[in-house]
Image (spheres, grey):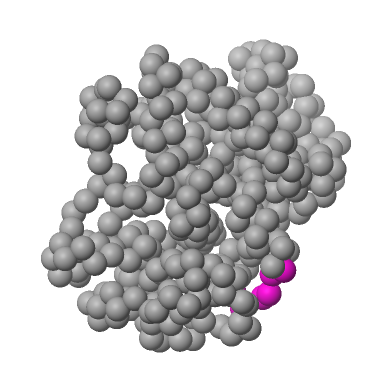
Amino acid sequence: IYRNIVGMKRTYEQLIQHHFADHTQMALLTGPRQVGKTTTSRSIQSKNNTYYFNWDDIEDRERILQGGQTIAAYIDIDRLRDTLPLLIFDEIHKYSQWKSFIKGFYDRYQTQCRILVTGSARLDVFKKGGDSLMGRYFYYRLHPLSVNELLGRAPSDTDIQKPLKIADTKFLNLLNWGGFPEPYLKQEQRFYNRWTRLRKQQLLREDIRELSNIQELGQLELLATLLQHQAGELTSYSTLAKKTRVSVDTIRRWIVTLESLYYCFSIRPWTKNITRSLLKEPKYYLWDWSQCTDKGARNENFIASHLLKAVHYWTDQGLGEYELYFLRDKDKREVDFLVSKNQKPWFMVEVKSSIKEKLSPTLAVFQKQLLLKHVFQVAMDGDYVDQDIFTLDKPTVVPAKTFLSQLV
């Protein structure tokens, strides 16, 4: 399985390669545990010109603590080479002074090397004293596998792709086993059970202990389980607080921590230009949609994850500012997802399990209010149709296989 993971060429490998070909800034690559950050980063350049430093390795940690000059001497940075060496600092966010170290090293040696920083926590969250790295890096968020990535496409300079057919077996395996490379490639239940249990333990025990002051780990695990079983539902912080026997403020802080460690992500309601819009709490979804036991919730989480990956990727590529929302008004009319582009509504998505379900009348209501050109009711069981759905200008039932192939 390790050979398969290494042999799987991720879209992000090419993205980071393009970064270092075009920019002198550092690349900050973050994403969930086991999503492929280390494999992706170590495959970017040849091994004899790439230096990997992992904060969790005792020897590497000692070198980092000794300072930038020690690292520079270790890699013989003053030696003339055909290409600049690539330095990878993995999980360095666990070092309380990581930003000062990286800033100092970059400012001194930026013309002599390229720097990639990776981490399983959001590096934009753990900021102390402002963003001292401003202007020195570009940020990339590594997501689980998606339909488009399984199609093997190279990075594109446009947001929407032409449709391309994915095999039914690949689509179903991605939906059922999730987008993390190891369980997706293995597709074996006992391995999946062990892998899932270990990943959750590492995240909720080891990472929480290292990166936060939370002591009530048992109650935090209960909160994670509750979020798992209500993925995509409207959030009631007071209900979660009662079930975990902590305060509402504590629940809010704990969820922020779970988000920062890529356990879950939030989608907030769009309120502009909506008559009788409802200012409600966000919905939460899991980074690993395979953990949703309810079929409908898994389908919705599956689409949510693809849309989040798309808006992050497009934004990180510099194509514009993209955001993901949901819609709901005081008349309880609701649409699952709205994608905005440069602060303007762009397209809307309602998720259904069956292609036979009638088109939701709510889509036309919100389309009129928001002046949306593209409105889709995405059917999970629909057969692939070879048509560019982003040429359509009225609400249409479309197959998930077609829709997702046009994202990233």
Left or right placement of residue 322 versus residue 7 in this view: left
Q: Is residue 175 visible?
A: yes
Q: Against 290, is 214 above or below?
A: above
Q: Please tell me whether residue 164 belongs to the stretch shown in magenta.
A: yes
Left or right placement of residue 218 versus residue 140 in this view: left
The structure residue drawn at horizontal position 38% and vertical position 16%, both measured from the top left corner, is 216
From the top left corner, tell me how far across and down residue 244 is, in percent. 32, 25
**Which image quarter holds the C terminus?**
bottom right
From the top left corner, tell me how far across and down residue 1 is, in percent. 81, 41
Q: Against 217, is 395 above or below?
A: below
The structure residue drawn at horizontal position 52% and vertical position 20%, both measured from the top left corner, is 205
Q: Please tell me whether residue 140 belongs to the stretch shown in magenta.
A: no
| SS assignment for the magenta stretch, majority | loop
The structure residue drawn at horizontal position 28% and vertical position 57%, both measured from the top left corner, is 269
Q: Is residue 403 visible?
A: no
Counting the numbered discs, the total is: 0
Magenta-colored span: 160-167
From the top left corner, tell me how far across and down residue 150 is, in percent. 70, 61
Left or right placement of residue 187 versus residue 401 in this view: right
From the top left corner, tell me how far across and down residue 41 is, in percent. 70, 42
Near-viewer residue (117 or 189): 189
Q: Quadrant of residue 154?
A: bottom right
Near-viewer residue (128 or 300): 300
Near-viewer residue (280 or 362): 362
